Image (cartoon, rainbow, N blue to C red):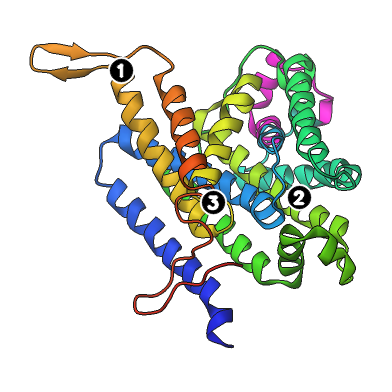
């Protein structure tokens, strides 16, 4: 295997080593910081899932957070104690009495997300131009409205509580590592290469015999499965499920992470998550108040979202391809691979 073929694996291995190092350092930090790192790993799982479709196809999707909601709700229904389900939900007897281990519920949730993604994406990938991103946003709205009003299954507008909290630092790291490995494998397959060809020129790709619709469908389903895994991890990290958690705010944050880092590389996806997580934590601390001598400096609520929006605008103007562009991390002494 030549150097050009091994470089994606070099990048994935180095990124995985950095993630493990961050987790090891976080174990020495206070619990609050450990929770921040755990949440960052969960969002990294989601952003890598987004990268599989958005980064390789060049088509934005505003609906993937909907698959987080699907994964989270399916896992919640399968893991909550039957007594709590009887009180809060109106499920069929089989689901009401069923309680599965967390890992089994995770697999089932990912399978459900894959089926939904396959059914939804089959017509969507036929769209062209701005119609496809707008259709994915419509998907997000549909999932949100269903989750908000399907009282018998999701709890409706009330929070669905009592989820087992099995997502810790190392569980979140395992999820992010699995997403990273799957993304690295996919982008080296002929399907990943074909999709990146269509990203550069859809007309030229179709002229060379690439079935653009099929490649987008494969990437969309795989991406939805990884994002659903992130939704399961997030739900069992919070211990509760609400429809509003998986809507516009989370969509904006995850897309910002992907765009700021660089949507055309795995390294960019990881860098965007790290950068935005650090900035968000800094502004969150300012919102809570920082003591300077005998005075406390506080910022009005919403400063974090405003700061992220300003940063996104600056990045889009100054570096349209993100902080790292299409650059991939490489072993010291070797020139990094540019492009896909």
Q: Position of residue 122 (x, y in %)?
A: 89, 47
Name the residue nearer the viewer: 8 or 163: 8
Q: Where is 330 relative to 301, above or below?
A: below
Q: Earlier in the sequence, mark 1 or mark 3?
A: 1
Instruction: Classify mark 1: residues with Cα within 10 Å, few (<14), some (14-19) or many (20+).
Output: some
Residue occupied by mark 2: 220
Residue occupied by mark 1: 288
Query: Tag on residue 321?
Result: 3
Q: Where is 157 relative to 192, above or below?
A: above
Q: At numbered mark 3, what does the secondary structure look like: helix, strand or loop? A: loop
Q: Position of residue 226 (x, y in %)?
A: 65, 49
Q: Find out whether residue 79 is within the magenta segment.
A: yes
Q: Residue at x 45, y 29 (%)?
A: 310
Q: Residue furthest left?
A: 293
Instruction: Classify mark 3: residues with Cα within 10 Å, few (<14), some (14-19) or many (20+).
Output: some
The answer to which image quadrant residue 215 occupies is bottom right
Could you give the CA–CA distance between mark 2 and mark 1, rounded to whole angstroms? Answer: 39 Å
Q: Give the magenta-colored segment's residue range.
A: 71-94
Q: Position of residue 15 (x, y in %)?
A: 44, 62
């Amino acid at each position: 295997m030549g150097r050009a073929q091994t470089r994606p694996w070099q990048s994935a291995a180095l990124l995985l080593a950095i993630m493990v190092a961050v987790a090891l350092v976080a174990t020495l930090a206070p619990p609050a910081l450990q929770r921040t790192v755990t949440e960052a790993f969960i969002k990294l799982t989601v952003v890598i899932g987004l990268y599989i479709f958005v980064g390789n196809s060049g088509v934005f999707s505003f609906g993937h957070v909907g698959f987080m909601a699907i994964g989270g709700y399916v896992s919640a229904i399968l893991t909550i104690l039957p007594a709590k389900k009887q009180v809060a939900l109106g499920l069929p007897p089989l689901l009401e009495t069923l309680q599965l281990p967390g890992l089994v519920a995770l697999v089932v949730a990912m399978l459900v997300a894959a089926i939904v993604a396959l059914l939804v994406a089959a017509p969507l990938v036929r769209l062209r131009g701005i119609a496809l991103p707008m259709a994915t946003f419509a998907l997000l709205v549909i999932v949100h409205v269903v989750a908000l009003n399907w009282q018998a299954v999701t709890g409706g507008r009330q929070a669905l509580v009592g989820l087992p909290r099995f997502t810790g630092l190392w569980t979140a790291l395992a999820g992010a590592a699995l997403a990273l490995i799957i993304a690295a494998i996919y982008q080296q397959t002929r399907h990943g290469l074909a999709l990146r060809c269509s990203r550069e020129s859809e007309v030229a790709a179709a002229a060379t015999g690439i079935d653009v619709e099929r490649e987008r469908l494969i990437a969309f389903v795989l991406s939805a499965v990884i994002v659903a895994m992130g939704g399961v991890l997030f739900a069992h990290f919070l211990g509760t499920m609400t429809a509003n958690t998986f809507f516009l705010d989370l969509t904006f944050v995850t897309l910002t992470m992907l765009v700021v880092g660089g949507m055309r590389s795995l390294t960019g996806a990881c860098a965007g998550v790290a950068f935005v997580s650090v900035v968000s934590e800094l502004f969150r601390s300012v919102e809570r108040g920082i003591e300077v001598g005998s005075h406390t400096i506080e910022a009005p609520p919403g400063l974090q979202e405003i700061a992220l929006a300003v940063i996104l605008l600056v990045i889009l103007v100054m570096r349209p391809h993100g902080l790292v562009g299409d650059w991939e991390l490489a072993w010291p002494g070797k020139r990094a691979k540019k492009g896909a």
